[in-house]
């Protein structure tokens, strides 16, 4: 199971993959040569052959996760965190819940953006970082990222063309890094990837953030994080999600599954908010916009999980809360049997309801983004959400039938998404970002 590139997730003419759900779906393509993960030569940028393909049950209980401790786009001071810590009598300690862990990240990232955005919410872009080679090579690196995005995430790529050149190039660079990371554990060479390889990939990430990229594609991201207030933690957290996929195939409750969804999908939203930008006329708090981006990531990943139950089961994986399965009178054996029963239908209804709740929370924040960045996000949200409708249309048979949104419905969704992207923040008082 990979990630779901969410806030800026794509949805090519194909379908979105079950795993990183990253911006789009790519299967059987190689974006990263796993052997390079083992190398520690970060000293140079290596241009690639232009001809080479880069193949890269309680709704109220759930609501606390959708809001990450806060409700909607209200001011944080008006709400309290629910279940921030969990008692651990056996150890005599207090364990921090997944909700609190993720909310701490949201606060940190939002604070970073508020410090670095200008008074009008615009990016104070810095000059290109010093790299081995020259600016022409850096431009070529960004072009390569754009080519990958255009080929494998066509619709999303078109949406990025509405952004300023700096924003679109930055989003392409993040897209490519996330896809490469996902391919480590979900790509053709996944069987060769070990925890040590992921450790080395993380070391390479740290070098990248210090302005020492290993290759062309790393160079584009290194330049991006030097210009925008993007923190390394969401990137590190995504790698942690890849580690989970190497060692974990069951989730005992939604708290565990929520943390996994954050790692492999919610992180993308947090990476992307500084690039997408917040409308200078938005009255929403920065934290609430991050909250909505996180909710879209969680919603997309939950949708991937529900769509791919049968496919994941064939690999011995069950990405569903074990305690909720038991409460519904179901077990792993029922999933492996792949039979749609009334118990399964009822269980799925609750799971779909939860995913839609996260989509509802995400909608509250899309309008608060910079106007030029809203269309691809709205399109992603609307198209992903329709997958849930297709699961219902298939009578909840996600064992042998793969729910997908047909091309006609996709194209019809695009003008709707564009119209919604033109709606400004509800109230306009002052072109100053609210804290």
Image (cartoon, grey):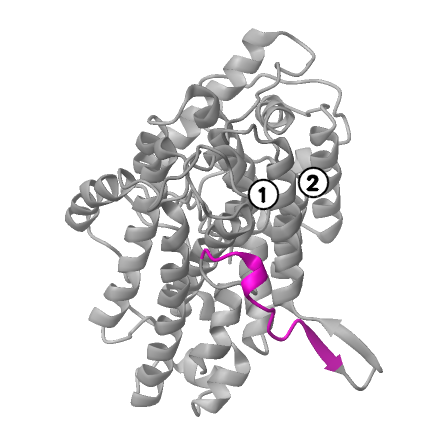
Determine if residue 151 is in view: no
Above or below 432: residue 68: below
Q: Residue at x 35, y 89 (%)?
A: 343
**Majority SS type along the magenta span:** loop
Of residues 214 and 39, the one drawn nearer to the viewer in this rendering: 214
75 is within the stretch colored magenta? yes
> Image point 56% across, 49% down: which residue?
267
- Residue 340's tag is none
The percent position of residue 39, horizontal first and vertical second, equals 74, 32
Estimate the x, y position of residue 254 in percent, counting from the top left: 54, 74
Please state the horizontal and vertical placement of residue 184, each as a whole percent of the image.
59, 46
Q: Is residue 407 left or right of residue 262?
A: left
Q: From what the image shows, is residue 276 above or below residue 58?
A: above
Q: Circle 1 sits on which residue?
A: 181
Is 77 situated above or below 231? below
Q: Which residue was labeled with disc 2? A: 201
Q: For numbered disc 2, what is the local secondary structure?
A: helix
Residue at 70% of width from left, 78% of height from top? 86
Q: Are marks 1 and 2 in contact (CB under 8 Å)?
A: yes
The reply to whether the magenta stretch includes residue 191 is no
Instruction: Name the spot of residue 261 as percent of width and height, x first.
Output: 53, 60
Q: Nearer the viewer, residue 78 or 423?
A: 78
The magenta region covers: 73-87
Element type where label 1 sits in the image: helix
Residue 89 sits in which quadrant?
Answer: bottom right
Q: Is residue 299 left or right of residue 261?
A: left
């Amino acid at each position: 199971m990979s990630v779901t590139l969410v806030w800026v997730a794509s949805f090519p003419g194909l379908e979105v993959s079950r795993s990183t759900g990253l911006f789009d779906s790519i299967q059987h393509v190689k974006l990263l040569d796993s052997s390079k993960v083992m190398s520690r030569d970060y000293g140079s940028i290596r241009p690639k052959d232009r001809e080479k393909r880069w193949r890269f049950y309680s709704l109220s209980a759930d609501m606390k996760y959708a809001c990450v401790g806060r409700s909607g786009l209200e001011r944080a001071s008006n709400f309290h965190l629910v279940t921030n810590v969990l008692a651990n009598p056996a150890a005599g300690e207090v364990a921090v819940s997944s909700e609190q862990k993720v909310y701490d990240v949201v606060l940190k990232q939002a604070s970073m953006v508020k410090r670095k955005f200008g008074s009008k919410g615009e990016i104070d872009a810095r000059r290109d970082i010093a790299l081995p080679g020259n600016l022409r090579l850096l431009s070529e690196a960004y072009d390569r990222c754009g080519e990958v995005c255009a080929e494998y995430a066509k619709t999303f790529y078109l949406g990025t063309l509405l952004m300023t050149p700096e924003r679109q190039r930055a989003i392409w660079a993040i897209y490519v890094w996330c896809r490469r990371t996902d391919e480590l554990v979900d790509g053709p060479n996944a069987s060769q990837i070990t925890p040590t390889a992921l450790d080395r990939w993380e070391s390479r990430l740290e070098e990248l953030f210090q302005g020492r990229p290993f290759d062309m594609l790393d160079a584009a991201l290194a330049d991006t994080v030097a210009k925008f207030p993007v923190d390394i933690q969401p990137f590190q957290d995504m790698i942690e999600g890849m580690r989970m996929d190497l060692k974990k195939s069951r989730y005992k409750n939604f708290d565990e599954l929520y943390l996994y969804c954050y790692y492999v999908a919610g992180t993308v939203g947090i990476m992307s908010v500084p690039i997408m930008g917040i409308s200078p006329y938005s009255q929403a708090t920065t934290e609430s916009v991050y909250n909505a981006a996180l909710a879209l990531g969680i919603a997309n990943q939950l949708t991937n999980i529900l769509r791919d139950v049968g496919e994941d089961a064939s690999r011995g994986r069950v990405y569903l809360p074990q305690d909720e399965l038991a409460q519904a009178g179901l077990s792993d054996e029922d999933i492996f049997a792949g039979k749609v029963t009334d118990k399964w239908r009822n269980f799925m209804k609750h799971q779909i309801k939860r995913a839609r709740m996260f989509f509802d929370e995400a909608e509250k924040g899309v309008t608060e983004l910079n106007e030029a960045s809203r269309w691809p996000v709205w399109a992603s949200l609307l198209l992903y959400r329709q997958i849930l409708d297709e699961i219902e249309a298939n009578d909840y048979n996600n064992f042998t039938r793969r729910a997908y949104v047909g091309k006609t419905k996709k194209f019809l969704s695009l003008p709707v998404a564009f119209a919604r992207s033109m709606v400004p923040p509800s109230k306009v008082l002052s072109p100053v970002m609210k804290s």
